[in-house]
Amino acid sequence: MGKEEENVNGNGTEQENIGALLEAARYNDLEDVKILASSGVSLNSMDSEGRTALHMAAANGHLGIVEYLIKSGVDLNVCNAEKNTPLHWACLNGHIEVVKNLILAGAKLSSLNSHDRTPMDEAVTLAKLDVIDAINATVAQLELSGVAVS
């Protein structure tokens, strides 16, 4: 069994398994994410920069992995070393469907990163009008259904 195969099966060191999980989320490999989770690797695991699988999937627009992680109950508002949440990264990179799904699942819009910016602030700074529209529409949808958004 090669080293790469070992990691996917969860038999490597903890840091190797966390690295494999984050890499699988970054490169949209849902099967590897599931294999690692079933072998006992926590889906909330962080690397040395505080990044989680949800950060990686959100930053890269991998909706299927984001949905799987949400259903698995991961922390939606976890902060990396720069205090960015997965929602910050989805907004920064313009991944509208990921933004909507994170908000609908309960991701906080009020979280401040190390630059004192909310996810919406990041979208505004980068003039990502489609992201701003998606945030506003999703928040309106939640509020109309009686859900308070923070």
Image (cartoon, grey):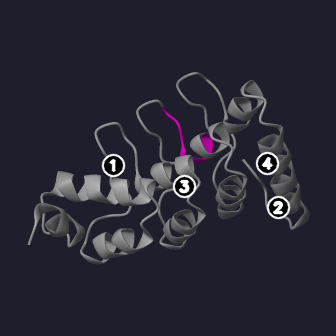
Please give left or right for residue 150 compared with residue 62 in the image.
right
Picture residue at 87% right of the left edge, 54% below the top: 137
Under tag 4, what secondary structure? helix
Sequence-first tag of 1 and 3: 1
Identify the residue under disc 4.
135
Picture residue at 32% right of the left edge, 64% below the top: 42
User: How many marks can you see?
Assistant: 4
The amino acid beneath tag 3 is: Leu
Q: Nearer the viewer, mark 4 or mark 3?
A: 4
The amino acid beneath tag 1 is: Met
Under tag 1, what secondary structure? loop
Q: Nearer the viewer, residue 23 or 145?
A: 23
Q: Position of residue 81 (x, y in %)?
A: 40, 32
Compared to 114, does 84 lie above or below? Answer: below
Picture residue at 39% right of the left edge, 74% below the top: 31
Which stretch did the figure color magenta? 83-88
Please give left or right for residue 128 compared with residue 15 in the image.
right
The amino acid beneath tag 4 is: Ile
Under tag 3, what secondary structure? loop
Under tag 2, what secondary structure? helix
Identify the residue under disc 3.
76
Identify the residue under disc 2.
142
In space, the residues marked 4 and 3 are separated at their CA atoms by: 16 Å
Looking at the rendering, in which quadrant would you find the N terminus? bottom left
Q: Do callouts 2 and 4 mark residues in contact (Cβ within 8 Å)?
A: no
Sequence-first tag of 1 and 2: 1
Q: Residues within 10 Å of mark 4 (few under 14, many from 20)?
A: many
